[in-house]
Every structure is written in structure tokens, then in C-alpha cells.
Image (cartoon, rainbow, N blue to C red):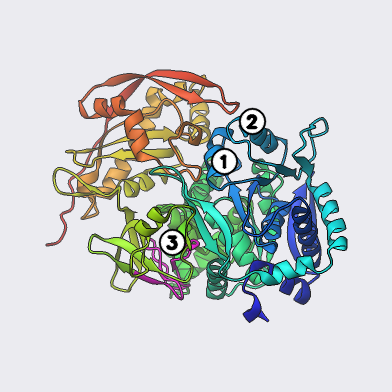
Amino acid sequence: MQAQNTTFPRWLQTHAQTRPTRPAFREKYLGIWQSWNWAQVQDEVRALACGLAAIGFQRGMNLAIIGDNRPRLYWSMLAAQCLGGVPVPLYQDAPAADMAYVLENAEIHYAIVEDQEQVDKLLELKSVYPHIAHIAYDDERGMRHYRQPELTSFAALQALGREWDRQHPGAFDAAVQQGQGSDNAIILYTSGTTGKPKGVCQTHAALIAAGTGGVGFEKLTDQEDILSYLPMAWVGDCLFSFAQAMTAGFTVNCPESGDTVMTDMREIGPTYYFAPPRVFENMLTTVMIRMEDAGAIKRQLFHRFMAVARHVGADILDGKPVAFGDRMAYALGQVLVYGPLKNVLGLSRVRVAYTAGAAIGPDLFRFYRSIGVNLKQFYGSTETCAYICLQPDGHIKFDSVGLPAPGVEVKLADNGEVLVKSPTLMDCYFKRPDATAEAIDANGYFHTGDAGLFDSEGHLKIIDRAADVGKMNSGAMFAPNYIENKLKFFPFIKEAVAFGDQRDQVCAFINIDMEAVGNWAERRSIAYSGYTDLAAHPQVYGLIRDCIEQVNADLAAEPMMGDTQIHRYLVLHKELDPDDDELTRTRKVRRKFIAEKYAVLIAALYEGKASQYIETQVKFEDGRTGMVAADLKIDACKTYPAVQAAA
């Protein structure tokens, strides 16, 4: 039967027939978990698809989907695919102006959105993009007095669909049967770190190959529970919460809101979990804050058993031989520290946890594996359905992203760029044949833009984005992301941007973590009025300097990185923000933009100044703009003699 599952609507039919009563989706609403089994989901999707057909949605059209992770939005993706259409998820936290480009580029006329907030954004855009003719909304709160003719509720659209289905018997089933694996299943827009986002067209066949490949690799079953809380427009969510869920038949759980994710996660206890490094960093920050607030005995126990975990935890997880005494000490730590800690984080039932989207610092990676969380890195991109390399159990390396995934060929170009050939490769960039030809060469290899190398066992190591890797005037390689990840391991540092290409030394911008540093300041009775005030405090500078000097000591011990220690730094007066175009929606640093916007600060760092005044325009959530000004202190930090690389 699975051989016939060439599209996701056919997978849905299979699950509805073979596991009709198994829970397919759950959603927490007003504090109560609602559940839908596979048979119910099939009925919901059918009604919605027929509703779309009734208002004119046809094969080849694109459907915008905007909102937090909601079962009805996932069903909307399936409904569009049932009719031969293509879902186009957008980042729900993007302001209206940012959405305009994607809506126009994807030629959107139909949209299904979560709530009033997203409806308001689309209505606001009518003056610049008037082509959206139909908007359906899931949450009806606040919508009572809206009278625009293009608006309809999700429930009303389904009711219309059920009537259309009765009047057109066989039409829905015929549309599903017409679908082919080579049809486009989704358009995902890239994060746009180097320019305008590009629409990545992924076929059913490519996404299904990625889904079944990962499911087989990790031996996933329909008994898994996953928490879906990351943006639906991100390829990682598309892989785990859609492609793998639809091929394995496991349960997708949607939290009540972004604010309740940790609470909801503890209630669900997912068996399979994924998050970008930022989420794991935030979890660790929360743990460290709680430990600093804990009593002396608890702190002593925590630090004592964490030392045991660092020593043998990862080896025990990998099934390697460990001395009896160490194993007993770890077992006691499991009862007193690791078990309760995993329970607080909602990771007690996790069998496999993945991180991707950016490089994760080895110290952060080691922390989770040491307490018994089977955290792995995987490597992929939007253009490859996030499926290039995976880490097999028992062969986890902190500094690699694993081995090429089943069915994937990976090689390195002469300049070290990672090249990929895979059945999961995109069909094309939407309406961008020029960009497609640039990304996929004549031999069918996709040029990832990442610089990497293979170790002696064939594991791939990603150094940095190929475009970001530079050279210092000394000839040393400069990999900014590598340095930044070391800095972000500290709970007090939320973001970092390193500079050093074609320069004599490395300097850095730092964003403090407001929660962690604020907690630290309050326990020392340090008064502050807000982020800018706290960031400029002399004692905070001392705290950050200590963190940087620890990173410098680590870098000095690494033969290739010793010359890239940080000499001078400043703490920015504002947080880097996607709304200010400094980060992408997936929180990747837009280096070129930051270098241009803060050129005066970079110049001050390298000219030896002790401080620099700057005024910066910021954008508020309601669309208004304002100015933030500060006289930023510039500080120097200690560097260490570098270990020389072997000849």
C-alpha cells in the first residue's frame, strides 16, 4: 500500500484506513487538550478542500497559510494538496510589510490564517497587494464586526465544502487521484540572509523521501509524540511535523501559545523532539538561573553530579564501557539531578532529540547528552528538505553533523564548499530559473554555500557559511559563526557578532540575555531601568569580559583558531531583532546588514576608542518607529598564547 503513497493526500487516506482511531493531532485550547484521530482528520481535510474548490481554488494555485502551529493550518496544507494546489506558509511574526513580497512573488489569491491579527495584516496590505480574494480564519474571536466580502470563517468554509461535496460526488476523490509525486507539495521561502527570500519548490516525492528516510533511520513509529511549536514556514517544522508525521503516522501536538510551550511540553512528554540551538540555549539559561537561586545544598549537588555527567554521561548514553564506580555515581545523579532536571524541561520521555538550523556549540551539545538526552545534530537546508547528514546512534561526535543520510551523496568542491545530490533536492526556486541554475550545477549537485570538511571516519564538519569564512591579515582562517557559538554557550550572552576578516584582530558585538543578566543583577542589588541601562553597567561589562576571556582560552588551545581570540568588544544598546532586519525570522545574523548599519561602532572598535555614541532607529510591534541612543563603552579583554598547528 505504501508503494502507492506518492502524495501526502494518499498517505492521509492510508492512515485513515489502517489506524483510524489513533490520535493524529492534538491542540491545547483554554487549558484542555483536544484530540483528532486519523479518520476525523481525513473528514476535516475533505470538507476544507471541497470548500476551497467551491470558492474557485484550483490545481496549480498557491494558498498562503499564516499563523502559529494549529491543526487546522496543517489540514489546510493537506487540503490545498488534495486539489493539486500548493501551500505557502509564511512566518506568523512577520510584520505586514515583510509579508507583501512573498504574497506578490507567490501570486497569492487565497489565504487561510489563524486569527484576527493575521487578518488585519492581510487587509492592511490591500493597498499594495490587492489580489487576495479569499481569506479564511480559524479563530473567530474579535471577528464579529468584520464585514469585508473576502472574509469567511474556517467553519463556514468547511460547511460550504460539505455541501459542495454532496453536489459534486466523486470530484474530490478524482482530484486526489490526479496528484503525482512530481507535483509541487509546498513552497518554502528562504530566510533571506543575503537578499530577498527565494521560494523553494519541493515536490511530494522529495518531501516523502526525506520523511521516510528520517523515519527509517531513527526507527520511528506511529506511537511517537512530537510537539510542534516552531514556525510552520521553517523547513525543520515541515520535515518533522508534516513530512515525517504524515509518513510515520505519529501524533502532532500543538501548544496553546508560544508562552505555554514549556508547560505544554511537560504535559505531553514528547518522545521525539526538535529545536534550533537557540531553544536549547534558552533551556540551559533557565536551568542555570534556577540553580543560582537555589539553596547552597542544591547548588552543591547540582555542580557535583554535573561534573560526573560531563565525565561519563555521554559514554553511558552511547553504550561505551564505563568504570563501575562512575556508573554508580551517575545512577545516583540520575535520581537526584538528571531525572528531575529532564522532567522540568519536558525531556523525560524523549528518545531522540534533534537540533539544526545553525551550528550548536559543542559545550551545549555535551551538556544535554551528558544528562541522558539523546540529542543529535542533523544537517540540511530548505533546498534539500533539511535532509543531508544524520548522526547514527553510538557514533555521535560533538564537532560534526554526522554521515550522509541514506540516499544522499555529499562531496566537497575544491574551495571546501559542501555539494549535495539527493532525491530530496528541490524542484526549483519559484519563478527564478537564474537562481536555480546558479544553485544546482550541470551534474545535479546543489551548492549549499557552507564550508566543510570530512574527518577520517567520513563525518562531515561544517566550519561556517562559505561566504562568511575569511582570513585575517596574519593568514589565519576566520570563522565567525564558530566563535559566536562559543560565546552563546554562556547563559548571559544571547547573541554575538564577530568581526575579523582582513583585519589584524577579532572584535565583537554582544547582546546580553535580559532574563539571565537581569536575574544576576537583582541578586547583587544592581539597579537598572531597562535593557540599555543594564547593558551599559560596569559590572555587566565585567561579567561579559569574563565570558569572553574563557572563550579566548578555549580558542588558544585549538591549533587552527588560536589567532582568532577576541581583543575588544562592546555590549550593544539594543537587542538584535528580525523586525529591524538585523536577524532573519529564524534568528540568523544578517552580517552584511549589521556591518553597514553599525559601521561607526566597528570603526570605533578598531580605532582603539574607549567609547562611541550612536543613535539607532528601532521598529515597535505596532509598526511605529523610534530612536534608541547610547554612548557605548568599548572594553578590551585578555588573550592567551596560541597553540601552534602541527606542520
Residue 4, horizontal then vertical, whole percent: 65, 79
Tell which circle, 3 or 2, labels the residue nearer the N-terminal end: 2
- The overriding secondary structure of the stretch rendered in magenta is loop
Q: Which residue is mark 1?
A: 294
Name the outermost residue toward the left: 647
Q: Are marks 3 and 2 in contact (CB under 8 Å)?
A: no
- Amino acid type of the residue tagged 1 in the rendering: Ala
Q: In this picture, is 297 found above or below 377? A: above
Tell which circle, 1 or 2, labels the residue nearer the N-terminal end: 2
Q: Quadrant of the N terminus?
A: bottom right
Q: Nearer the viewer, residue 497 or 525?
A: 497
At x 48% / y 74%, what residue is drawn? 319
Residue 441, horizontal then vertical, whole percent: 34, 64
Closer to us: mark 3 or mark 1?
3
Q: Residues within 10 Å of mark 2 (few under 14, many from 20)?
A: some
Q: Residues within 10 Å of mark 3 (few under 14, many from 20)?
A: many
Instruction: Report the magenta residues as a range.
Output: 384-410
The answer to whether 151 appears left or right of 283 in the picture is: right
Q: Residues within 10 Å of mark 1 (few under 14, many from 20)?
A: few
Q: Which of the labelled discs sits on residue 124, or is there none?
A: 2
Secondary element under disc 1, as helix, strand or loop, is loop
Q: Which residue is mark 3?
A: 379
Q: CA distance from mark 3 to mark 1?
A: 37 Å
Q: CA distance from mark 1 to mark 2?
A: 49 Å
- Amino acid type of the residue tagged 2 in the rendering: Glu
Residue 369, horizontal then vertical, whole percent: 48, 61
At x 34% / y 38%, what residue is drawn? 592
